Amino acid sequence: MRCPSLNDLRPPPPGRAGWPWTEESPSLPDRMENGLPWPRVNIVTPSFNQGRFIEETIRSVLLQGYPDLEYIIVDGGSTDDSIEVIRKYERWLAYWVSEPDRGQANAINKGWRRASGEYITWLNSDDFLLPSSLERTVPSVARDDRVQLVYGDALLIDEDSRPHPVPFDRFRGRPLRLEDVIMSWRSPVPQQGFLMRRSVLDRVGCLNEDFQFSMDFEYWIRFALANGQSEYLPRTLAAFRRHHETKTSTMAQRRIRENYAIYDQVFSGQLPTRMEGEAKASRASLHLQAAYISYLAGNSGDMRRYALHHMRESGLRSSPRAWLFFIISLAGDRFVSSLRQFWRTFRVSLASRLQ
């Protein structure tokens, strides 16, 4: 399906303006510069009770001006107004369904298994693509058969779609190197706006449905272990909506457990020879990252525990951050949460001064 134009869609809700409400990407010609037709792109949006945001997501996909789009929405049985919003745009959807599922990864996998496109991605129902995102990513994959995954940066936005203050307004990507990932335990790949060949599914498989918060991180590691070739584009391709209220202690603990499960998965499998001796250092880094996640959630007990794990594992090579986390944690949950709020306010103040 060729993407519709702005005039084809219903008018936006009152008070909505700009991208993707009253603006659209330029319509691309039927063929790329090399004379070949644009390859079909499949985008899957998993959703559950995101009626507040999903229309912005849908419009950002449909208004890409792309000549051959296959858009699938897999809703988990929403009880808000999500279904009403989806029906407004079903004319331009290849498929959509609303039924109970086993979580986000399961919803994405269901959509990917229906995909007929050469290239695939997923876009969460509270994020959105920026103008001409597909125009930038598709040629980057198409020009080199060795490239299987491309990604860029993501603009960080709040609940009202306002960008975070500069210079804290980007989730910046980095080259995907397995050694760097398992020594930092931070994802170098912003999931928002990525594009990969569908053939990757045959080589790497679908998302692991046991993971709820680290499923994309686990997938990039599996991709790297399979010697997948990726390319980082220094362009901002999509918007990533960060919700402050999602950093709860329960969710943080789940994310930490998933990261430790990924560690066990990585180091119980076949690693490249150059990395066989990195298990202890990687685990120490994982403890440090767990302490940081606990800090974000305001959980001083877990913060202290993981900082001590790091120090025991690293000995004299312990990171100064671990000592800082340990000292801060001694003041308790309320102090940790207040410190986090102070730092957030300070960053906003600093950013306003730099502008």
Image (cartoon, rainbow, N blue to C red):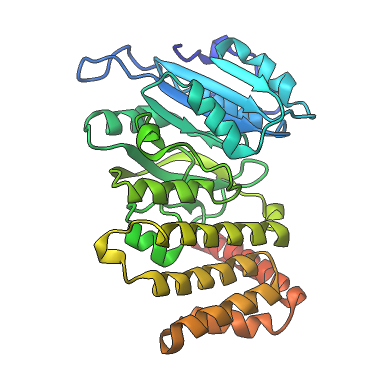
Image x and y of residue 262, in percent: 49, 57
Horizontal side of residue 340 vs 80, given as left or right? left
- Residue 52 visible in the current orientation: yes
- Specify the farthest residue to the bottom: 316
Image x and y of residue 235, in percent: 37, 42
Q: Along the line of sight, which residue is nearer the eye, 320 or 225?
A: 225
Horizontal side of residue 270 vs 51, given as left or right? left
The image quarter in which residue 250 lies: bottom right
Q: At 55% from the left edge and 79% from the top edge, which residue is drawn?
A: 309
The image quarter in which residue 196 lies: top left
Relative to residue 234, is residue 17 depicted above or below?
above
Q: Along the line of sight, which residue is nearer the eye, 180 or 55?
A: 180
Image x and y of residue 26, in percent: 41, 20
Image x and y of residue 334, in percent: 77, 74
Relative to residue 87, is residue 144 depicted above or below?
below
Q: How many marks?
A: 0
Q: Along the line of sight, which residue is nearer the eye, 14 or 182?
A: 182
Q: At 61% from the left edge and 47% from the top edge, which residue is drawn?
A: 212
- Residue 18 visible in the current orientation: no
Q: At 33% from the left edge and 13% from the top edge, which residue is drawn?
A: 29
Q: At 40% from the left edge and 48% from the top edge, which residue is drawn?
A: 222
Relative to residue 318, is residue 134 depicted above or below?
above
- Specify the farthest residue to the right: 79
Q: Along the line of sight, which residue is nearer the eye, 308 or 154?
A: 308
